[in-house]
Amino acid sequence: MRGYERADREACLSLFDSNVPPYFAPSERADFAAFLDDLPGPYLVLEDLNGDIVACGGFGPTRQDDTVAILCWGMVRRDQHGCGLGRQLLAARLDLIATDPRFRTVRIETSPLSRGFFERFGFIVDRVVPDGFAPGLDLVAMALDLGGSGANPRA
Ligand SMILES: CC(C)(COP(=O)(O)OP(=O)(O)OC[C@H]1O[C@@H](n2cnc3c(N)ncnc32)[C@H](O)[C@@H]1OP(=O)(O)O)[C@@H](O)C(=O)NCCC(=O)NCCS
């Protein structure tokens, strides 16, 4: 696990592509590319033993409330889903967030397909927006209270 560098841009975009569809809509690719070009906070990449990037994800503060960290653009290469990489990536991000005493809540906006993953680690759904990401792709807004008793992603 290490910090994102500009040279990782294409590899991260191909992780995105591997998840289209159903996890991301093609129309979101430009947003992700723009995000990579102007990161709002820490962004991590996870390499396999060959040095290939197999997962990436980050977080940033929210503009409206600086006690809230928002997880951004987390993803695992499609052929590596279910191998524990998503858990590692989430644990690393939550560890970094925990080093900043400002943050009391972690938020994520994800799709219904990944909702169960975040519920597994204590996130609670507070809003579902039909077609919120793109036609046919609902947005599920979820929150984790850092004072709460969510499952440890390392467990
Ligand atoms: C969501 C995502 C990051 C999960 O990563 P992953 O590497 O497949 O998950 P892991 O293998 O680490 O799974 C950890 C645990 O969560 C469970 N889990 C994984 N995906 C799940 C899902 N979609 N729903 C419910 N549980 C899930 C696993 O079964 C495992 O449980 P266990 O500890 O009981 O064995 C991955 O599926 C992904 O990249 N999806 C596409 C992008 C995406 O939706 N990102 C979310 C933010 S927008």
Image (tube, grey):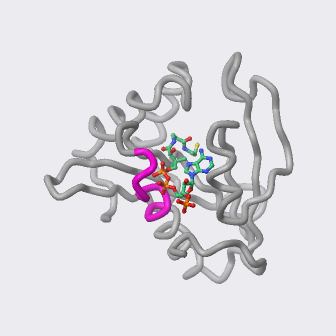
Residue 96, image x, y percentages? 51, 74
Q: Quadrant of the C terminus?
A: bottom right
Please tell me whether residue 70 is drawn above or below residue 26 in the rendered image.
Answer: below
Please tell me whether residue 125 is drawn above or below residue 148 in the rendered image.
Answer: above
Q: Per the image, is 83 magenta?
A: yes
Residue 104 vs residue 15, the one in the foreground: 15
Q: Which residues are magenta?
A: 81-89
Residue 148, image x, y percentages? 78, 77
The image shows a total of numbered marks equal to 0
Residue 76 vs residue 135, the one in the foreground: 76
Residue at image coords 83%, 38%: 128
Residue 116 vs residue 100, the one in the foreground: 116
Residue at image coords 85%, 50%: 126
Residue at image coords 56%, 23%: 25
Q: Per the image, is 28 magenta?
A: no
Q: Residue furthest right?
A: 126
Please tell me whether residue 74 is drawn above or below residue 41 in the rendered image.
Answer: above
In the visual, does 123 lie left or right of 25? right
Residue at image coords 49%, 62%: 87
Q: Quadrant of the N terminus?
A: bottom left
Residue 129, image x, y percentages? 82, 32
